[in-house]
Image (cartoon, coloured by chain):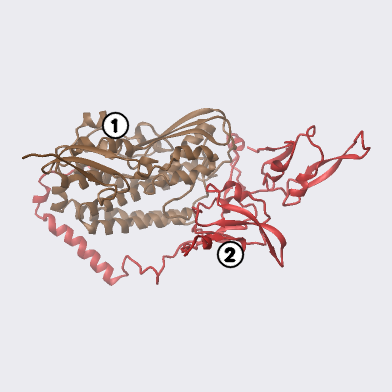
Chain colours: A brown, B red
Amino acid sequence: MSEEMWINMGPQHPMTHGLWNLRVRVDGETMTAAEPIVGYLHRGWEKMVENRTYPQIIPLADRLCYGSSFTWSHLYCLAAERVFNIEVPERAQYIRTACIEMQRISSHLMWLAAVGTDLGSYTILLYGMRERELFLDLMVELCGARMTYNYVRIGGVRNDTPPDFERNVTRVLDTFEPRIRDLEALCDECETFRMRTIDIGKINAADAMNLGLTGPSMRASGIDLDLRRHDPYEIYDELDFDVCTHTDGDCYARYRVRMDEMRESVKIIRQCLEKMPKGPTRVKVPRCPPKGTAVARVEDPRGESLMYMVSDGTDKPYRLKVRSPNYVNLSASPAMLLGNKISDVPAIMGVLDMCIGETDR
Amino acid sequence: MRIEDMRYTKADHLRATGYIFKSMKVTFKNLVRATVNRPCTILYPWEKLVYPDNYRGRPGIVLDKCIACARCVKICPNQCIEMVPIETPELGKVKRPQINVARCMMCGYCAEECPTNAMMVTPEFELAAYNRADMMFDPIKLQHPHKPGYEVNYSFALISEMKGGAAKTYAKNDPEMHDTIVLDGVKCISCQRCAKTCPTGSIEMAETGELNPKTKKPIKWPKFDNAKCVVCEQCVEVCPKDALSIKEVL
């Protein structure tokens, strides 16, 4: 009686956060094969930027992923600074680090809201979005936009912080820190949430490594790898923070890693504000870099993202390669999906934190 | 709280507090807070969030301040700005930027590049229109009341000075510290196009003291007034013999 059937989940499906297609073969309700198909949102980003000058690419890099746009524009500037061979002023580095961590928190909160809706809990969406608003307001005050900031510049940041920025950030962090407990009370203590995540989508450390998983999804399998500590950029080597890992490798562990990371981010932002020196925030950069190549990689909220830049000495990059963490994480998803029930797909894929803008580029 | 303390065990949901009481506590806490104090949401069309002046909505312009240097046209990543001729009683016949707001991505680069801060970011974000023609903001429609907070200003330092240890910063378009135009005199044919195209009038054709051997008239070369120059590069682009180039201050 067991006749297997292919099911298309997507391109338009509540489970897909964006435009992509997951084809699953089901035997009854158990998945026996899975095949993610991406490319519905391909915009030719890598080709497009070859026709833009170096500063013009920064707002475009923001739009790779609206959820964590700061990390992408920062990654682009980091790669460009290595091509230009420029040292960034110290104050700019501290501002950047604080902003990256704020972006990490707001990205994780949006992820939590999305996971909440995927698992049928609208409450978590509302709580997550409310907390996220605190950080968006801070960013509006800093650079004038809620999501696509266009704040990092090659050689620093656009402008200095507004006068009472430090006080506002401290106030927001003081509000936010106890509220993580509230979010956890809504998820961790909820039997439905636990039943739908614990022991679902398991992946062991060896598979996670071989499939190239990075970021929180990899750390949930017990692999202690965080580029903030293992390949420090900006001023992460001067800060004191823990890398959050869990050993279970299931959806619940991935959820826990992200919740713990938010706490660590709060810690990092506080340290940045404490140590922030005075000084210039931006240096003037030449229009054309010398010939050469550069690689920069950072720890995105979703994993390891990388940019490889080739410059031919003109004011436009010759080639800009983007390694998106989600593209690799998505390719690894069949390993997590197989053997689970089809009703677990939203939980597994939701917890991966899909972002199609950077996956398809 | 340390991470080790936060680690969960499989029997967490059997604790005395139970899985329902904690969640209900959070819910009721927030219910009381939202009822006694103000709610977390706003009724959008009637209420609006208060945003600071530097909020990046559509670009706006002060026509009197604009000098038609077209730096905004060059920096725009979407190429949605175009210089169009307009005629007003105060200004006469001039060129001013027109923005296709439908294509604009509100990055604020035009305001950041503007040497006179004529272009600025405005908090206007409700831009929906019934047709595409309405999204084409000509210079007259693009005008917006000025407020100091709408201007995008920044300060920068120079790499050469940073290495020396001095942390002096310069304001945007500091006349003392910007790129300069240099002339390769051998190539110059004294056509005066640079002087005619300069929006600030900082180029003056000065006699070099030599005489043209054929016509016996004095040879004139452009002379640049750095304090007035805004480095719009129009002279560099218009030069038919590529005699002008930019010398960057780094």
Query: Where does the image place residue B166, in percent across and percent down from the top left?
Result: 60, 39
Direction from residue B57 to residue B63 in the image, left or right? right
Number of numbered discs visible in the structure rendering? 2
Q: Dot 2: what SS?
A: helix
Query: Where does the image place residue A13, in percent across and percent down from the top left?
Result: 26, 50
Q: Dot 1: what SS?
A: loop
Choose top left, top right, bottom left or bottom right for residue B144: bottom right
Asked whether residue B6 is in view, the answer is no
Query: Where does the image place residue A336, in percent across and percent down from the top left?
Result: 20, 37
Between the C-alphas of marks 1 and 2, the distance is 52 Å
Choose top left, top right, bottom left or bottom right for residue B4: top left
Which callout, 1 or 2, points to the residue nearer the camera?
2
**Mark 2 = which residue?**
B141
Q: Nearer the viewer, residue A204 or A257?
A: A204
- Residue at mark 1: chain: A
**Mark 1 = which residue?**
A212
In the picture, the quarter occupied by the C terminus of chain B is: top right
Q: Is residue B240 above or below residue A141?
A: above
What residue is drawn where x is 45% and y is 50%?
A149
Direction from residue A286 to residue B89 in the image, left or right? right
Q: Residue furthest right?
A: B216
What residue is drawn where x is 27% and y is 44%?
A258
